[in-house]
Image (cartoon, rainbow, N blue to C red):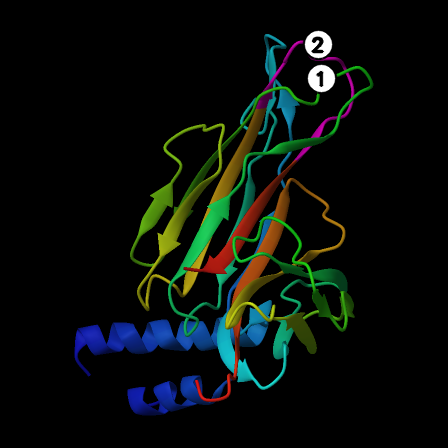
Amino acid sequence: MWPLSLVLLVLMSTPALACALALDVGGVLRASPGGDRVGSDEANGRAATFIVSNALLAGDFRITVARPVIVDAPAGFDRSAPTYVSYTASGLLSSYGSGGYVDHQTSFDVTGLLSALSVIMTLNNRFTSGASGIFPGHYATTTTVTCAPL
Amino acid sequence: MRPALSLLAIALAAGLAATAAAAQSLSPMTNSGTTPSDVKGFRLLVGNPYKQKMVFVVVPMDPRFEIAAEDAMVNFPELTMAPGMSRQVIVTFRIDAQHKERTIGVCVWPKQVDGPILPRVCGRYTGKRLVAGG
């Protein structure tokens, strides 16, 4: 095994590392049984997972999760319908989360050397029927997740 | 080796392995420097951490990463990169004569997103004017 000092030396000699966001599993939206909402945590839906990594020497950073935006929906659907996001995140020494579904932008700070190695995030989107109701068809949402320095 | 030291060494080694498998998306994430003129530039490294060829957009933004920055440009606003590869870009921005310094943001994200997440990595960069006698 390499001595710790050698490992540190190699780390120091690499270019300044920074934040990388890599999508692991894309989410899938499904309608609720009652037809009053669409979400990735409904039956046969799937949450999105992704990994925030390589922030070892970049210092402390902030992950910001924006409110989802409806980017695709059948004609006539009210795209301004309320949207919500829920997420959990796990680091080596810490865990974070939105505390359930929220309808606004939230963020959490990842600080400390070991916490910053990698953070695995699981994220669910949901929107309700709005004024128009849910029509049969294809729906898609996009949630912007930003990794940035504090 | 003491247990705590062993854990740290393992964690650091894991970080090295992750680096080799997935290059950084934006580096450095913060920087500052001086300029004798009213324009400041920074060299940034944009990497593709995905397993396939990707097109990324690089956009100068305000420091809160909300709107595009005025009087700022990047030499390659779109980058097509093979998996695991990195490429250098240069971002330049004008510092108003009324101000001694200006901070801008730079954000990188995939041009086409297949899925519900738009992953965005942003940095913050400050240019300071060299003022004679100051």
B125 on left or right of A129: left
Quadrant housing the N terminus of chain B: bottom left
x 46%, y 77%: residue: B16
Q: Is residue A132 magenta?
A: yes
In the depicted structure, whether residue A39 falls above or below residue A17: above
Q: Amino acid at mark 1?
A: Asp
Magenta highlight: main SS = loop
- For this orientation, the residue located farthest to the right is A75
x 69%, y 76%: residue: B89
B87 on left or right of B130: right
In the depicted structure, whether residue A86 falls above or below residue A10: above
From the top left corner, tell me how far across and down residue B91 is, in percent.
67, 73
Q: Amino acid at mark 2?
A: Ser
Q: Is residue A5 magenta?
A: no
- For this orientation, the residue located farthest to the left is B2
A34 on left or right of B75: left
Task: Count the numbered circles shown.
Answer: 2
x 72%, y 70%: residue: B74
- Specify the label residue A132 is tagged with: 2
The answer to which of marks 2 and 1 sits earlier in the sequence is 1
Quadrant housing the C terminus of chain B: bottom left
Asked where in the image residue A73 lies, by quadrant, the reply is top right
Residue A17 visible, this angle: no
Q: Are marks 2 and 1 in contact (CB under 8 Å)?
A: yes
Asked where in the image residue A11 lies, by quadrant, the reply is bottom left
What residue does disc 1 label? A78
Mark 2 lies on a secondary structure that is loop
Q: Which residues are magenta?
A: A127-141
